[in-house]
Image (spheres, grey):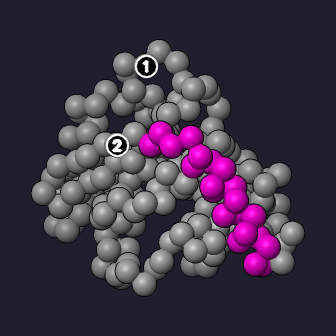
Amino acid sequence: MTAALTFDVATHRYALAGRELISVTQALTEAGFIDSRWYTEDAARRGTAVHAAVERFHATGAVAVDDETAPFFDAYLAFQQEAGFVIDGAEERVCDPACGYAGTLDLRGRFARFTAGVDVIDIKTGAVPVWVGYQVAAYARLVDGLPRRRWVLQLRADGTYRLEPLTARTDERVFLAALLVAQAKRGWV
């Protein structure tokens, strides 16, 4: 994490010492991987609320969720109790100044069954998109520790969860290619 990294919530823009950085989501969208036509305002609001609840829970221990968010947060608590995941960070803003991108990784830590390395988890409250491996690879390359393991945690409305490993070896290269395409479209390269 870089102290000079800023994030404007209203515009969803990251900057490092005044220099705009492209977000992981923007890179994947501008390269054609993410099609936002299929997302609804309700789903976006729900996802934001669940992420905020997880962040608040890890920062303060407080749990404050509404009726819509509660089953997803219950699924998260079930994951925490059953999976043996030790949290080192939640909702962390990270960046790569050399490559010119930034993002907010959902969870960083380690599963108790592993003695070394770091695990990066992305939380989804809807369907798991095909591009999630590229997204989590972008975040994983910004954390310290080897090996880096990548996961997607799907929280469901029925209070259950599904944790899947992301193991495709090409995910990081695909993300970096998407980043380059997005930067070229913006005239940054």
Quick check: marks 2 and 1 in contact, CB under 8 Å? no
Q: Position of residue 153 (x, y in %)?
A: 34, 48
The amino acid marked with disc number 2 is Glu
> For residue 144, which quarter of the picture?
top right
| Residue on which disc 2 sits | 164
The foreground one among 59 and 128 is 128
Q: Position of residue 71 (x, y in %)?
A: 17, 57
Q: Position of residue 156 (x, y in %)?
A: 21, 57
| Residue on which disc 1 sits | 114
Badge 2 density bin: few <14, some 14–19, many ≥20, Cα 10 Å: few
Q: Which mark is residue 171?
A: none
Left or right placement of residue 5 versus residue 187 in this view: left
Residue 93 painted magenta: no
> For residue 135, which quarter of the picture?
bottom right
Pick whichever of labels 2 and 1 is earlier in the sequence: 1
Quadrant placement of the N terminus: top right
Residue drawn at point x = 58 percent, y = 74 percent: 32
Residue drawn at point x = 31 percent, y = 27 percent: 84
Q: Which residues make up the magenta segment?
A: 166-186
